[in-house]
Amino acid sequence: MKYPVAMNMLVYGPDMNESLIPHLSYIKEVGYTGVEIPIFETDLAYWKPWKEEIDRLGLEVFTVTFLGADRNTISSDPAVRKNGVEFLKKAVDVTAYLGASWLSGPYHSALGVFSGAAPTQQELDWSKESMLDLAEHAQKMNVMLGLEYLNRFENYVVSSADQLYSLVKAINHPHVKIMFDTFHAHIEEFNTGEAMIRIADEVGHFQLSENTRATLGEGQVHWANVFESLDKMNYKGWLVVEAFTPLLPAACIWRKNYSTEEELILKSYHHIQKFIG
């Protein structure tokens, strides 16, 4: 089946300064018809030149974000939870301003914050409460929320497809769906394709990421399994290439697993075309 394909700009690091804007034209030249942009700055004026270039190029746009400890949506401190939700509402506003339809990420809780135990029911309830508050705002702004599970080394609240599926079902809001990332699935699932199919009715957005976080097809992810399962799911959304480099400190990748960002982008696109072209 043919799928539209986008490129995540985190390949160039988390700082979306204006020097990165020219890369958008290269991404389109390669063949991508969309881009996914990380949102950590919530001043709408900051994004004006990005919007102008995205509109000029005719690219579809998606956004992603994540939270630190000071914005943890499952914190026992109500002020911290509120801080997280307020930031996310502003990220939704940026998403809408850019003309994007999805804000994805693991913001059901904070990245890299651990309790030393399994999530409690209270923490899951706080996550549900925070996401429902956010979802009401997202619905008004016509933005879908794509919650993502991370591997157990990055998050303890939801680190498998089944755990995230249960949370999304508990939230039970039309603007809250699952964003599936093959990197985390490759670590946590017994069979990535089977996990995809089990939760298919809630998957609305999809990221393709190699186990090395570098060029698709040069690692150990079973891509035939992934693409066959996408077809079995009757998936109708976008595929987004998510690749990290040493330019993204949060990923803790301190070695270069690729030649250049441009070659990584090009080769990953060609790899996808082998399955959907």
Image (spheres, rainbow, N blue to C red):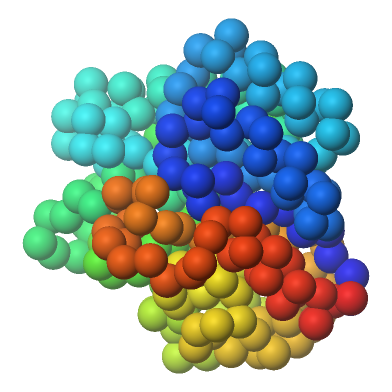
Residue 8: give x, y in percent of width and height.
Answer: 60, 50
Residue 182: give x, y in percent of width and height.
Answer: 54, 72
Q: Can residue 102 be seen in this view?
A: no
In this rendering, position of residue 253 left or right of residue 41: left
Which residue occupies 45% across, 90% down? 190
Outermost front residue: 259
Q: In this orientation, which residue lies closer to the viewer: 83 or 26?
A: 26
Outermost left residue: 116
Residue 61: give x, y in percent of width and height.
Answer: 72, 38
Give residue 173's quadrant in the image: top right
Q: Is residue 263 above or below residue 127?
A: below
Q: In this orientation, which residue lies closer to the viewer: 196 or 5?
A: 5
Residue 120: give x, y in percent of width and height.
Answer: 22, 57
Give residue 234's quadrant in the image: bottom right
Which residue occupies 33% across, 46% down? 109
In this rendering, position of residue 94 left or right of residue 255: right
Which residue occupies 76% across, 26% down? 53
Q: Quadrant of the N terminus?
A: bottom right
Which residue occupies 42% across, 58% down? 245
Q: Is residue 44 visible?
A: yes
Q: In which quarter of the image is the C terminus?
A: bottom right
Q: In this orientation, which residue lies closer to the viewer: 204 or 19?
A: 19
